Amino acid sequence: MIAQEDLAILKRAGISDELELALCVPAAYHDYRLKPYLDLKEPLLEIEVGSSQKLPKFLKIEAYAKNIDQKIELIFFHTSAYHYQVFKEGATLYVSGRVQKSFGNLQLIQPKKIANYKVGRIFAEHKVAIRGDIFDGLKKKYLTKEVLGSFGLPPEVIDSLLGIHFPSEEFFRSFRKRGEFWGRYLKALKFTEAFVYLRGLKHKRVYHKALCQEARWPQEWLDSLPFAPTSDQLQAMRDIYEDLRRPIAARRVVVGDVGSGKSLVMFATAMMNYPKRTILMAPTTILADQLYSEAKRLLPESMKVGLLSSENREEDLEAYDFLIGTHALLYKQLPKACVVMVDEQHRFGTEQRNRLKKLVENEEGSPHFFQFSATPIPRTKAMMQSALVDFSFIKQTPFVKDITTKVVGKKDFKALLAHIAQEIKEGRQVLVVYPLVEKSEKFEYKSLEEAASFWQKRFDGVFVTHGKDREKEEILRRFKEEGSILLSTTVVEVGISLPRLSTVVVVGAEHLGLATLHQLRGRVSRTGLKGYCFLYTNDENNQRLQEFAKITSGFEIAELDLKYRKSGDILSGKEQSGKSFRWLSLAEDKEVIEKVQKVLQ
């Protein structure tokens, strides 16, 4: 535990505990050991200052270097009052600088005075907002085997961290070469960085008493379904079943690839919780309507299912066992519910998600809270978040999607139009996604507004919408029933079911993230229909798009996305522009994170 007076000093450098101090890595290393000979380009010399001479271009000071028993000239090209004050005749100092010979004389160029506390060792230099001798003293005080061991760090990691801060001769030589020897020190920094992050999450997790702690496995209902759930769906259901029986309120994220059948897991959760109430919040009216229709079709009649949205204002919410709604739920006096679920959780802010949960919390406890996401995340990311929430993954899909993905350009446009015409002729639908709504001089592709007339002249049943369009939900509804081509931005990235949609064309595909491209591709082939995804770009050799075209699994796409981006602060949702780990790479350091998890268990 750092003493309060020391902590006040360390906070100037953004350090709040000993582990953060250990991660404050030196900016440079200097050999400040006194030697009786010159063996370095910038040796440390103990000098006695003699007379000085101001010449037109430099200041020359005669000196005697005691440790090598030789006269030496100190040459200063840039001087200030400081130099005249420090390098007074008769003063004994430790200095370091670049050595050269001139007309047989030994010279030290622009030497620096070296503080006594640095002398006699290989010194680790830090660039921090704390005076050097004070920071050095704090390191000696708090970076010890005993202190670092009290956190639970493995001995080999502690030894490496201490080696970084208090370097040996072997370390100094190897550091310059940066070979395999340096590799173990880098691993120690990665381990410590992951350790600090996961340990912080563990302390952040808040445990609440559950409002309810019982559940019934819905075997009879599962047997009555017109299809068999996948093993991943069943595993997610079992995870939730165990959660519902615990006295601590669950906090679980169910991550499922596009079309993996997350809604069935939601309905199973409501069944396991029945006859106690379940609330489900969806991001749009269309999604809420779809979930409501599916729930009415698949759940037993004995379960009363209700729908609450801006268009459908139910009043007696107490009457329902399973209440499905949009964010309109946030503005209602909600009845007691043992389970709260949020679909497409990333579409809601943290505040909105927490507000829904708090609406049904009381002094008795908190509801079990389940979030569903259609954005697969890399395994390393899930591992890093697992201290804060539990995870279930649905990787399988009820049927194998048959989607052909191609990177296309201007030379392929004629063939693309022919494909679209043929699909429409056969009663199927096409989605064309544009990156911008309005014209931009800085963008090399046509905007949604510019391109609309082209499609409307050539095809019937062309519908246009975008994110800021107040009528978008109504347009999507009409398109589903009577449209041929939908021109849109990424507003249709998630959620809406379009059974006849066979083709998606993404214009300027290189400007979109891989996760978004995968979500857009997931809009087609929802019912086993042969699907096509065309990535239209002026950069047909784009490596990222070429790799994406060969992969169909959302979880593999997430790993690929991580490879092309900086790893970031997961909790805040910041990635490329956010805080990055300095040493740890989520794309490469899965083994390191696994080791940290084991140590923290």
Image: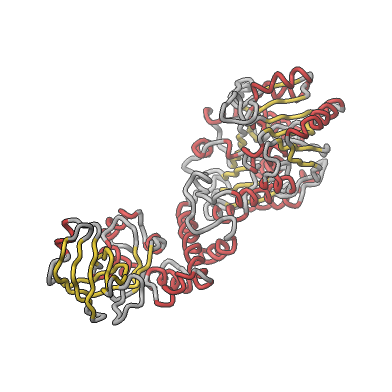
Q: Residue furthest front?
A: 103
Residue 387 in the image: x percent, y percent?
53, 55
**Quadrant location of residue 401?**
top right
| Residue at the spot 26% in from the left edge and 80% down from the top edge | 68
Residue 191 versus residue 578 in the image, above or below:
below
Q: Quadrant of residue 520?
A: top right
181 on left or right of 80: right
Q: Residue at x 61, y 52 (%)?
A: 563
Return the x and y of residue 281 as percentages of the image width and height.
60, 34
Relative to 1, is 208 above or below? above
Please state the horizontal and vertical placement of residue 73, each as a whole percent of the image: 23, 70
Q: Residue 77 or 15: which is nearer the viewer?
A: 77
Residue placed most toward the observer, 189 or 266: 189
Q: Is residue 46 above or below residue 477?
A: below
| Residue 219 pos. (x, y %) | 76, 48
Determine whether, in the image, residue 448 is placed left or right of residue 398. Answer: left
Colouring scheme applied when the structure was drawn: secondary structure
Say above or below: 32 vs 586. below
Please indicate, yes or no, whether residue 553 appears anywhere in the rendered image: yes
In the picture, the quarter occupied by the N terminus is: bottom left
Residue 244 visible, this orientation: no
On the image, which quarter does residue 131 sit in? Answer: bottom left
Describe residue 435's horizontal placement relative to residue 417 as left or right: left
Identify the residue shown where x is 50% and y is 62%: 190
Q: How many marks?
A: 0
